[in-house]
Amino acid sequence: MNKINEFENKIVLGDAIEILDKIDPGTIDIVLTDPPYFLDKMDDNWDHKVVSNTKNHYAIKSLPAGMKFDPEQGRRFYKWYFNVSKKINRVLKPGGFFFSFSSPRLYHRMASAIDDADFLIRDCFIWLYTQNQVKAMSLNHFIDKLSISKEDKAKLKQKLSGWKTPQIKSCFEPIVMAQKKYDGTFLHNVITHGVGLVNTNVRIGKNMFPSNVMAIEHFEELIDKYFLIDKPSKKEKGESNNHKTVKPLKICEYLLMLSGFSEDTIVLDPFIGSGTTAIAAKKLGFKYIGIDINKEYVEMAQKRLRAIKLNSLPFFGNQSSDLPLLGTLRMQP
Ligand SMILES: C[S@@+](CC[C@H](N)C(=O)[O-])C[C@H]1O[C@@H](n2cnc3c(N)ncnc32)[C@H](O)[C@@H]1O
């Protein structure tokens, strides 16, 4: 039996490092994933109970929330993700795409890990938003603990008024766009392997060419009009979904529509969480494989998948009807 059939349209419980080795080489069109970033408890030992019961997430326990910073975090992440990326490279078809959500502080580690695993880095998508917590802290609390006079404390506080720890407000999330090396020319690759180009018929905003910027909320008229992407609502996340890092379905659909060439497209997410990638794939008529190490998330993903109305249109599905739709461009080898 072809090993891939074992997993097709399934959410598999297990460690991605092990399950990836069980997927046949060169059988996946697109990997779209949001891996653990090695922040706090969210590493490759991500435990659902620990993560959901910890109110404040810190990288270094002895420091207050605003000052957490662990330089080793990026290095540990690189090492682990380089290994993951090599396994992803093996299962992708030539020219297959690898989209990976990241964070501004760890982007360089992620992009290098993917690059070093023999991918071509094609671009970087930016998801913009305005509402995020400010993490920079005033130093008043520490000044109070200094053994100096009250007057000197007051003077120092005044001098440092407005000066905070070096953390600017994070207002974007980068997404690595990488591609497995393609076979011969782009044309040869797409005819032979059915993947490797982007569908520029997918329009955003008012008929705009697909772009690498996506945004939620109001910025200013121009950006708002073209890149509006809401954070996932409670309804979108599904009943009792307490996953901490649910991604917007719209972003997943956009990336899959850009890169999925035909209805035979197989989308893999090795860190599927509550199932967003699989939901987007299913809504677009693609096949999916999801993996997660936590049983609670696997069950949540399965529950969300069952709740999809099969005829519900994808968010970006209202493209001009005289343009070729997904699947109709398929070529025979
Ligand atoms: C950032 S979350 C993904 C969230 C997802 N995008 C969503 O919308 O719900 C990362 C997921 O990776 C899972 N995970 C962590 N280590 C793993 C491993 N070694 N193998 C498979 N899954 C793992 C965690 O349980 C977590 O659900």
Image (cartoon, rainbow, N blue to C red):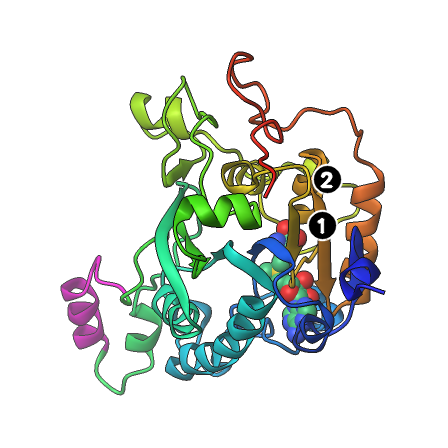
* Magenta segment includes 84: no
User: Which quadrant: the N terminus?
Assistant: bottom right
Q: What stretch is highlighted in magenta?
A: 150-164
Nearer to the camera, 150 or 43: 43
Q: Which residue is drawn at 76% across and 41% down?
A: 238
Please name the predominant secondary structure of the magenta segment in the image.
helix
The quadrant where residue 121 appears: bottom left
Q: Which residue is drawn at 56% across and 45% down?
A: 194
Q: Which kind of residue does numbered mark 1 sit on?
A: Tyr
Say which label, 1 or 2, has the lower sequence index: 2
Q: Does the residue labelled 1 lie within 8 Å of ligand 1?
A: no
The answer to whether one can see residue 171 in this image is: no
Q: Mark 2 points at which residue?
A: 282
Q: Is mark 2 on a helix, strand or loop?
A: helix
Q: Is residue 140 above or below residue 246?
A: below
Q: Residue at x 68, y 24 (%)?
A: 313
Nearer to the camera, 240 or 304: 304
* Magenta segment includes 156: yes
Where does the image place residue 208, in percent across and percent down from the top left? 37, 23
Nearer to the camera, 218 or 330: 330
Mark-to-mark CA distance, 1 and 2: 7 Å
CB atoms at circles 1 and 2 under 8 Å apart? yes
Where does the image place residue 96, in percent across and percent down from the top left? 52, 54
Q: Name the residue under label 1.
A: 288
Where does the image place residue 45, in percent across and percent down from the top left? 66, 78
Q: What element carries label 1?
A: strand
Q: Which kind of residue does numbered mark 2 sit on?
A: Lys
Q: Is mark 2 within 8 Å of ligand 1?
A: no
The quadrant where residue 197 appears: top left
Where does the image place residue 92, in percent across and percent down from the top left? 57, 61
Q: In which quarter of the image is ligand 1?
A: bottom right
